[in-house]
Amino acid sequence: MGTESIVLYKLIVLYMLDRVNFTLTNSQISDFVLEKGYTNYFTLQESINGLVDSEFVYVSTIRSSSHYKITDKGEEALSMFENKIPYAIKQDILEFFEQQQINLKKETEIQSDYYLNEANEYTVSCVINDRNEPLLDIKFSVPTKAVAVAICDNWRQKSTEVYDLLVQQLWTSKPSC
C-alpha cells in the first residue's frame, strides 16, 4: 500500500466531513469506507489518526464514541487536493449521505453522556441540537451508574417526547386562584 493510497483515504474522510454540517462518528465513516471496500479497518484508522495528528480533523469523545469534525486547516487541505478524489468516489459519498442522512443527523444531534460528580452520584447530560445550536440541554443527578446508563440509552428514543412534554408543561399557563 503506497503513500498515495493513504492520502486518498485521508481525502475521502475530509470530503465526507466537509459535506455535512455536523460531526460524524468513527463508525459512520467506517461503515461507508468498509462497505465500499476502499480499504481495511486498520488502514482507515491510521488515516483518521493522521488527520487528527495533523489537526485537519478535530475529535471529541461522547460516551466512548469518537466524533469527528473537519477543521479550517482540513478544509484548506481538501480544497487544494480535492481533485485527487475520483468522481465516482465523490458520487458514492453523496449517495451514501442521501440514503443515510436522517440516521446520520439523528445520531449526532441527540446526545447523552454521564460522569461521576463530587457528591459521588452521576450527573447525566441530555442534549438535542438543531443545526449545531442547543434546542434542549439538561443535566441532572442520579444515584447510580446503572440509572445513568439507562437514561443515556433511552434518550435517543424518547428525546422528542421529553422535549414536547417539557414545552407543553412549561408553556401551559395555569389559572391563578
Image: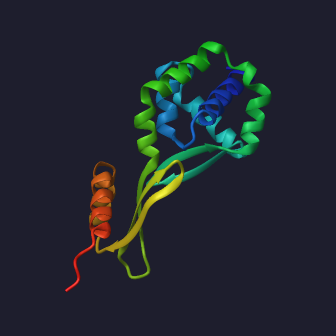
Is the image coloured rainbow, by chain, by secondary structure, or in one colour? rainbow
Which residue is outermost to the right?
80
* Residue 170 lies in quadrant: bottom left
Please provide percent x and percent y for residue 146.
27, 64
Locate the N terminus and report the quarter of the image it occupies.
top right
Which residue is outermost to the left?
177
Which residue is outermost to the bottom?
177
Please provide percent x and percent y for residue 62.
48, 54
Q: Is residue 106 visible?
A: yes
Please provide percent x and percent y for residue 144.
29, 71
Report the side of 123 relative to 144 (left or right).
right
Q: Is residue 2 visible?
A: no
- Pick whichever, 171 or 30, lies toward us: 171
- Pick whichever, 102 or 147, lies toward us: 102
Q: Residue at horizontal 60%, vertical 32%?
A: 19
Report the side of 32 relative to 72 (left or right).
left
Locate the C terminus and report the quarter of the image it occupies.
bottom left
Q: Residue at horizontal 60%, vertical 17%?
A: 89
Q: Residue at horizontal 27%, vertical 54%?
A: 161
Report the side of 130 relative to 4 (left or right).
left
Look at the picture and state if 104 lies above or below 155: above
- Pick whichever, 153 or 34, lies toward us: 153
Report the side of 81 relative to 132 (left or right).
right
Please provide percent x and percent y for residue 99.
43, 25
Look at the picture and state if 176 lies above or below 29: below
